[in-house]
Amino acid sequence: GMDVEIAKSLTNLYSSIMLLTEEGVLPSNKKSGYVLRKMIRCIVQLLYIEPYTLVIDSVKAATNCYLSLIDNCQDSHRRNFLSVITDECVLYIKSIDRGKQLARKFLRGKEQIPVENLYSNIKDTFGLPRIVINELLTQLE
């Protein structure tokens, strides 16, 4: 089963995302759209597994599970809610994948640099989540 803390975090994220999407907010780089984007990206990070296609399946399953607990939600809003979350997850996963490829190129020949320095360089340069950076650095060793 799922870790209780992760389940609580997901529930909080989903309820907040539901409120924002009900108000017509879409993921963006401005104001509440940025907050929405960050919350959806947190879901990806909580459900992170390789290959990323499994993340999408996990996100869809978790989202549908959350929606099954909501009684007074219209079908059109359910579809919109699932679509907003899934679409943003796909974009984020593609972004992570591009970042991983670039980070791998960056890491070639940098084995002598301390891991702490590499970690912050990758985080600052490529904006990858902690779990992905740890995976890349483990492969380097």
Image (cartoon, grey):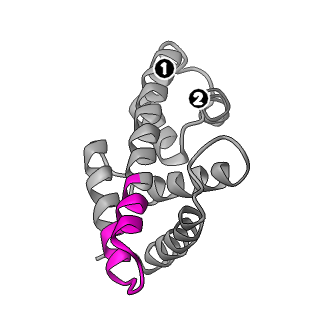
Front residue of 69 and 45 = 69
Q: Looking at the picture, how far across and down is residue 115, in whole percent?
A: 59, 34
Q: Residue at x 42, y 66 (%)?
A: 77
In the picture, residue 4 is in which quadrant?
A: bottom left
Q: Splitting the image into 4 quarters, where does residue 51 fall? A: top left
Instruction: Give the farthest residue toward the right.
Output: 31
Q: Earlier in the sequence, mark 1 or mark 2?
A: 1
The quadrant the C terminus occupies is: top left
Badge 1 amino acid: Leu
Identify the element where label 1 is drawn.
Answer: helix
Please name the amino acid that badge 2 sits on: Phe
| Vertical relation: 66 (above or below) 85 | below
From this viewpoint, which residue is outermost toward the top? Answer: 109
Left/right of residue 31 with respect to residue 44 in the rendered view = right
State which region is magenta: 63-83
Q: Is residue 122 above or below residue 107?
A: below
Q: Secondary structure at mark 2?
A: helix
Res. 102 mark: 1
- Contact between marks 1 and 2 (CB within 8 A): the answer is yes
Q: Position of residue 30 (x, y in %)?
A: 71, 44
Q: Which residue is mark 2?
A: 126
Residue lying at 66% horizontally and 40% vertically, measured from the top left: 29
